[in-house]
Amino acid sequence: MHLYGTQAIDGQGHLTIGGVNSIELAKEYGTPLFVYDIELFRKRARAFQETFESAGIGYQVAYASKAFSSIAIYQVAAQEGLSLDVVSGGELFTAVKAGFPKEKIHFHGNNKSLGELQMAFEEGIGCIVVDNFHEIGQLKLLSEELKQPMNILLRVTPGIEAHTHDYITTGQEDSKFGFDLNNGQADQAFEQTHRHDYLNVLGLHCHIGSQIFDTAAFRLAAGKLVSKMSEWQKEFDYQCKVLNLGGGFGIRYTEEDQPLEPSQYVKEMIDTVKQITEDSGFPVPEIWIEPGRSLVGDAGTTLYTIGSMKEVPEIRKYIAVDGGMSDNIRPALYGAAYSSMIANKGHQALSETYTVAGKCCESGDKLIEQATLPEAEAGDILAVFCTGAYGYSMASNYNRIARPAVVFAENGKHQLAVRRETHEDIVSLDLEYGVKAEL
């Protein structure tokens, strides 16, 4: 059994996270419960930044907060000196409420509304990552009307396909994101923005996929983007200051996954950019990256209470938990695999293989197809590892199930970061039939 970060098994055979007994957490806060190992989050953030600092080049490490957004996690990110990647007005609002430094907020998205862009100007954020020509038109109108400058990056698709699940591959030519680097769209976008009175083109951005385990695709993408920067320098006498290579660094969900250390991804990016810029006589730009999953993915563990059990003779044994696709849609959405343990039986032998089923009214609500565990009993606490990214952030009220609470554990202490929804919360926006209400 692989343990993550500060996880350990104590003398009672109980899983501990951040020095806190997970069984006690389940008793105090209830289940399902997301528990975040904040020390591991901090360790990962520092590892990315220290690699850049050792290389002596300018950088920003922006937490890609779509992986998990909350006021508390934004505040921890700020403590660690991270920048912040947001993709909606809701995430931007959360960042403002958290007191996150506005000049370090980057706003992404392929269909930002006019209201969201206005909010970005009003809050004076650091950068907008521009995705399409429609957005360029909106930014021109807004900045001219407000007479307010805005830093922008042009998001491009470099035509490089990372080896990952089709649903989460975003850097190839046929993508809903960005300006194509190979068909002239990126050049058109640059020509429309780089001499504008209020839009300041900092440089280029790309994101080639997610859950990537090697550096080859990042090196290829860096080469193509620096080559384009060099072209623009020669043709327009323009100096691109920033090269943003996105995120997508993989983590270990199961024993089949073999990710690199965060420092290795960064080191090879830096080495590639330095080599290419030296060969072309182009100054080394600042390198920005956007880790999300690799900061919070394996820092998060979900605790469930086991309830009903069912055996289909000679086929499989089921155990059902008090959550499921309502708090972790990834297994049903694209077959994501997870590892687990019974958190109160850490010293017992692994003797059974179960399919872990959720409680939603869907046959496909299975969290783990084959979980090797000690013999399970109703009331046991099942810990599912590496749920910190895209678990809570993609959670829903399907079947009118309340979303779980989120707890941070660190240095033997714990605190509630997001309270559990109640049934009253679920109906709080509902209106009675025939009752006229204001929007």
Image (spheres, helix red, strand yellow):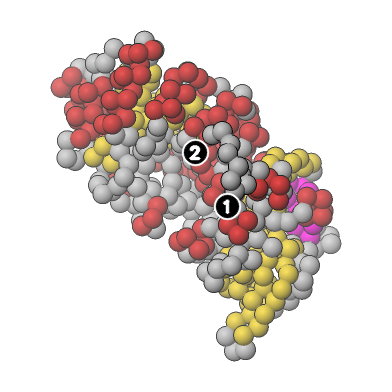
| Residue depicted at 38% across the width and 48% down the height | 209
Where are the magenta residues, as a range?
Answer: 14-23
- Compared with 213, 247 (above or below) is above
- Compared with 251, 365 (above or below) is below
| Residue depicted at 64% across the width and 76% down the height | 318
- Compared with 156, 391 (above or below) is below
If you read the primary sequence from the N terminus, does the residue marked by circle 2 or circle 1 appear first?
Answer: 2
Question: Residue 408: within the magenta?
Answer: no
Residue identified by numbered label 1: 396
Q: Is residue 420 visible?
A: no
Can you name the residue that lies furthest to the top here?
Answer: 147
Amino acid type, label 1: Ser
Q: Is residue 94 left or right of residue 335?
A: right
Residue identified by numbered label 2: 64
Dot 1 falls on a residue whose secondary structure is: loop
Given this view, does label 2 or label 1 mark the residue nearer the observer? 1
Which quadrant holds residue 369? bottom right
Q: Nearer the viewer, residue 253 or 112?
A: 112
Which quadrant holds residue 164? bottom left
Amino acid type, label 2: Ala
- Compared with 164, 414 (above or below) is above
Estimate the x, y position of residue 430 in percent, counting from the top left: 61, 46
Can you name the residue that lies furthest to the bottom here?
Answer: 314
Estimate the x, y position of residue 78 in percent, counting from the top left: 60, 28
| Residue depicted at 26% across the width and 31% down the height | 133
Tally of numbered tags: 2
Q: Which quadrant is home to the C terminus?
A: top right
